[in-house]
Amino acid sequence: MLITVSGPAGSGKSTFAAALANALEVDHVSGGDIFREMAAERDMSVVAFNELAEEDDQVDRDLDRRLREIASENDDLVLESRLAGWMAGEHADIRIWLDAPMDVRAARIADREDKSVETAREETTARAESEAHRYEEYYGIDIEDRSIYDLVLNTSRWTPAAELEIVLAAVESYDPEEDEGRAPVTGVDYDF
């Protein structure tokens, strides 16, 4: 079963995806890890590579192409990235979107990156606006459109253990035969 986990920065998607993959005893592939690998391939720091991504759309397109290839080649996997639900396309069995209010996300980011909450909020807001613009420009994706997701969870409402329990219950009750009538992810221009 291919499960995607997406959400904005600070939503808890990386931690959750790793826990879900562990519980299901499947591999976990992180878009962030792929991004870091791509930076290393070019002998660049992640910060420098991120700056390059702002100027060169090929960086995002290469990352997204890798995500799409991984989704098409793997059946038992938790694929995690901001666009995983979109990039997995018809290959995804269950798409999950994790979110939390900005105040919660900014506090989480501030804690993990040892910066002020206000700085984390400003940087996260700027990053989200930049990414939303790029996703729309590159692929025609409205990142605010949650209609493709099977589950949307507010991670400020439950503990990580409760989130995992909720999703595992959904995974356990999933019936692929019922999925045949599901509308495919459409309108995405996968021109990498």
Image (cartoon, rainbow, N blue to C red):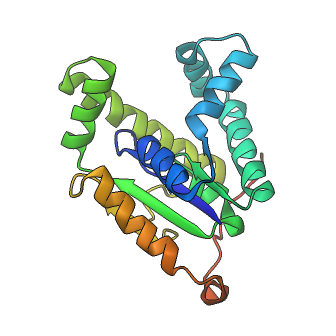
Question: Percent position (x, y) of residue 190?
Answer: 74, 55
Looking at the image, which residue is at 25% across and 52% down?
Answer: 159
Q: Is residue 78 above or below residue 180?
A: above
Q: How many marks?
A: 0
Q: Indicate the quadrant where residue 90 lies.
A: bottom right
Looking at the image, which residue is at 68% across and 25% down?
Answer: 37
Q: Is residue 172 above or below residue 158?
A: below
Question: Percent position (x, y) of residue 72?
Answer: 78, 58
Q: Indicate the quadrant where residue 77 lies.
A: bottom right
Question: Percent position (x, y) of residue 79?
Answer: 60, 51
Comparing 32 with 171, the one in front is: 171
Comparing 16 with 99, the one in front is: 16
* Left or right of 151, for residue 189: right
Examine the rendering and report whether any part of residue 6 can be seen: yes
Q: Is residue 2 above or below residue 131?
A: below
* Left or right of 17, for residue 31: right
Q: Is residue 47 above or below residue 160?
A: above
Q: Quadrant of the C terminus?
A: top right
Q: Indicate the quadrant where residue 168 lies.
A: bottom left
Question: Percent position (x, y) of residue 139?
Answer: 65, 53
* Left or right of 149, for residue 68: right
Comparing 84 with 61, the one in front is: 84
Looking at the image, which residue is at 26% across and 34% down?
Answer: 108
Examine the rendering and report whether any part of residue 141 can be seen: no
Q: Quadrant of the N terminus?
A: bottom right
